[in-house]
Image (cartoon, rainbow, N blue to C red):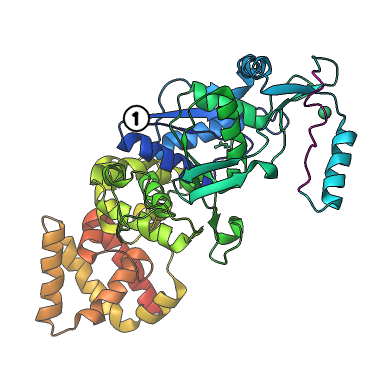
Amino acid sequence: MASVVTRFAPSPTGHLHLGGARTAIFNWLLARHFGGTFRLRIEDTDLLRSKQEYTDSILASMRWLGLDWDGEIVYQTTRTELYNSYVEKLLASGNAYYCSCTSEEVEAMRQKAKAQGLKPRYDGHCRNLGLGPGDGRCVRLRLPDSGRVVFDDLVKGSIAVDVKELDDMVIRRADGMPTYNMAVVVDDHEMGLTHIIRGDDHVSNTPKQILLYQALGLPVPRFGHVPMILGKDKQKLSKRHGAKAVIEYEKDGLLPEALVNYLARLGWSHGDQELFSRDELIRFFDGTNLNPSAACFDDVKLAWCNAHTMREMPLSELVAKVRPFVSTLGFGTLESERLEPLCVMFRERASDLLGLAESFRPLLLNATALEYAEKDARKHFVPAAAVHLKVLEGLFASCEPFDAEHIDAVLNAYVADNGLRFKEVAPPLRTALMGFMGGSHLNEIMAFLGKEETVQRLARARAFCEKG
Ligand code: GLU
Ligand code: ZN
């Protein structure tokens, strides 16, 4: 097989969304699986809606997702001449012709066909008039008189369309601009595409594009049309379903590995495996097992996938990734030696980087700034707790070295030697240290805070207990 070439061809009319990201992922995976080439093309011909800021944002999201592309980016707006050279070829070979019909005339033809119960289409009025170029004249493709366009879709299987369903489509408008399908076919050919995976909102363009390939005598690539991503209620995916642009997931501290993993599974499967490393995705994704029915976006499963990724990734990587979120929250720039124990303590409890950074908050404040959760304070800061906290203050003050192991020994000895139960001592201690009944292992929390801060927190909480 010739080397696989795929592409992603976004229109820069908005940020990269989940559907686009998934299309990009599938094409990227297919290329990487076969050791092929993944190209990027910016379909910026809609001058009113296309914006440079969106192109920049899409590229940034691609980079963030780790979807590296090969070769130069192709911008459609720079290629009008190229497209027109293909239009000229079609004119020269007789596969295309000039049409002088006005839009009113074409509309009238459509209405007439409709009235006869036929598909609304251009009736071929100028097909054999032998018109040359002229003001107000577009160029149309001459379709075969009969026959079917058949293709084997990677996702949907065999698709056949009778040419009677189609009409001699415009390939260059009267203003000299090639039309969308014309540009796409020229680009896909020039860029050497062998496989095109895209949203099934394009499936009706495909027979038209295939007719163009055939008229030009060009090889037709393989197509795969993936169904839309829907919300859980089977409606078109939107913010309402908790779906966000890729750039927002980045801001909120999702891990790109998790988003790639989750989206790859949305409409593709490999047995019942849910969690994949990037290498596994590349190894298993070969363009088969793409699901022809619509997949539903599930933000809970995405969060689960992200939590898993966060748990499994190397600690040093997690530290590097959480650091910017720690600064954003105003906790300053922390050394890796400080961030590492925090990540160890909290990585299993958070579902994204922002949540992870946020969970560090109680440990990064000074004792006096710690706020107590009202419910927990009321329940655990009782006079009896003051006694425990007072003794522990003294014991911890003389605990040397003040590390997790020795702290644990001190705490356990206090509980055992006094015939106490852990659950009498731990809740007030935890509330004193964290401000609420959450967090990680008490000894690790205290080791992180250090002796002085620990003792201060206990003393401050004791004052509350004594007030009752
Ligand atoms: N630019 C098109 C889009 O954003 C993609 C066209 C294609 O994949 O052929 O939907
Ligand atoms: Zn005409």
What secondary structure is the magenta-colored segment mainly?
loop
Q: Residue at x 62, y 26 (%)?
A: 183
Residue 370 shows in this picture: no
296 or 123, nearer to the observer: 123
Residue 56: where, in percent of width, then height?
A: 55, 30
In magenta, the rendered stretch is: 119-130
Relative to 275, is 418 above or below?
below
- Tell me residue 316's x, y (percent): 25, 42
Residue 192 visible from this viewpoint: yes
In this rendering, the answer to whether 117 lies above or below 73 is: below
Q: Is residue 212 above or below residue 298?
A: above
Q: Give the side of residue 460 with respect to residue 215, left or right.
A: left
Mark 1 nearby-residue class (10 Å; few <14, some 14–19, many ≥20) = some
Residue 456 screen position, x and y as percent: 30, 61
The C terminus - image quarter: bottom left
Percent position of residue 421, x then y: 19, 83
Residue named by callout 1: 36
- Residue 407 placement, left or right of 311: left
Which is nearer the eye, 324 or 182?
A: 182
Front position in the image: 73 or 191 = 191
Identified at 24% across, 46% down, the residue is: 315
What residue sits 52% from the left and 52% below the top? 227
Q: Residue furthest front?
A: 146
Quarter of the image with the N terminus is top left
Q: Amino acid type of disc 1?
A: Gly
* Quadrant of the image occupied by residue 207: top right
* Residue 341 placement, left or right of 368: left
Find ligand 2 in the image and state its quadrant.
Answer: top right
Q: Quadrant of residue 43?
A: top right
Q: Is residue 324 magenta?
A: no
Confirm whether the magenta stretch covers residue 126.
yes
Q: Secondary structure at mark 1?
A: loop
